Image: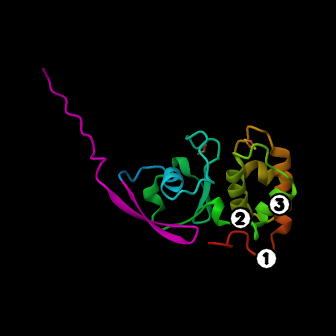
């Protein structure tokens, strides 16, 4: 009988990855560089603001920034994040000094259950870095996240409000990064 040999990579071999998250350096020990960045952020670094939704890069709940770009971290291998600047919802503002997007979200009372909202805010912050005064068409084209509570109308208002709050003297991305 023909023998079939299946090669299993050694997943128990550990490696260290250096990650720059919200302005702090972290050395994390992992067994697989293809581990989604989301799990490292949530389970190792204990930053729970970034959410798991679909796990297939479809809903946007897991959106964070890598080098200022909105990235769906459920489908982004942690090995690709090394040497880059990662920003999560915890890194863009504080309760006392909210990011313009967070301030706009508060003013427009956007969240319902709230689960999807960090991803939307991170996607919005990335959009405003590129397009400071987005039109409705810009928003429809760029913000493709999913909200099961259908807060889309209030979100659109909040995105326009965040654009008003954003000023050239206070770039929207850089409070903690
Ligand atoms: S959990 Fe990442 S896109 Fe849905
Ligand atoms: S506010 Fe509930 S899923 Fe968006």
Number of numbered discs overlaid on the protein picture: 3
Mark 3 lies on a secondary structure that is: helix
Q: CA distance from mark 1 to mark 3?
A: 17 Å
Which residue is identified by label 1?
Answer: 168
Q: Specify start and end residues of the magenta stretch as a single range.
A: 1-30
Instruction: Label 1: state its secondary structure.
Output: loop
Q: Is residue 10 above or below residue 125?
A: above
| Label 1 vs 2, first from the N-terminus | 2
Residue at image point 76% right, 70% down: 96
Residue lying furthest top in this view? 1
Give residue 166's position: percent from left, percent from top: 80, 69
Which residue is rendered at x = 58% and y = 68% of the image?
Answer: 22
Report the front residue among 167 and 118.
118
Write the residue at 33% across / 59% down: 15
Where is mark 2, residue-wise?
130
Q: Choose top left, top right, bottom left or bottom right for residue 135.
A: bottom right
What is the number of the mark on residue 9? none
Most distant residue in the bottom direction: 169
* Residue that label 3 marks: 104
Where is the C terminus found, in terms of image quarters? bottom right
Mark 2, secondary structure of its residue? helix
- Across and down, in percent, residue 119 comes to 67, 51
Please say if the residues under marks 3 and 2 sit with CB atoms less than 8 Å apart: no
How far is the residue under mark 3 from the one under mark 2? 18 Å
18 lies above or below 7: below
Compare marks 1 and 3 and give the one earlier in the sequence.
3
Q: Where ligand 2 lies, by image quadrant?
A: top right
Q: Residue 142, image x and y in percent?
A: 72, 52
Image spot of residue 123 (x, y percent): 69, 55
Which of discs 3 and 2 lies nearer the camera? The answer is: 3
Q: CA distance from mark 1 to mark 2?
A: 12 Å
Q: Is residue 5 magenta?
A: yes
């Amino acid at each position: 009988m023909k023998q079939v040999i299946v090669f299993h990579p050694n997943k128990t071999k550990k490696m260290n990855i250096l990650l720059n998250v919200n302005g702090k350096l972290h050395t994390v020990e992992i067994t697989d560089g293809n581990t989604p960045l989301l799990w490292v952020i949530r389970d190792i670094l204990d930053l729970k603001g970034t959410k798991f939704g679909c796990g297939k890069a479809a809903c946007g709940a897991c959106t964070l920034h890598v080098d200022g770009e909105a990235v769906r971290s459920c489908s982004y291998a942690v090995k690709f994040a090394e040497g880059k600047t990662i920003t999560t919802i915890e890194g863009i503002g504080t309760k006392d000094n909210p990011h313009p997007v967070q301030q706009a979200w508060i003013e427009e009372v956007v969240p319902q259950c709230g689960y999807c909202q960090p991803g939307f805010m991170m996607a919005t912050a990335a959009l405003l870095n590129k397009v400071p005064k987005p039109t409705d068409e810009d928003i429809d084209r760029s913000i493709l996240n999913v909200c099961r509570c259908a807060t889309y109308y209030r979100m659109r208002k909040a995105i326009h409000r965040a654009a008003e709050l954003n000023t050239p003297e206070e770039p929207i991305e850089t409070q903690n990064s």
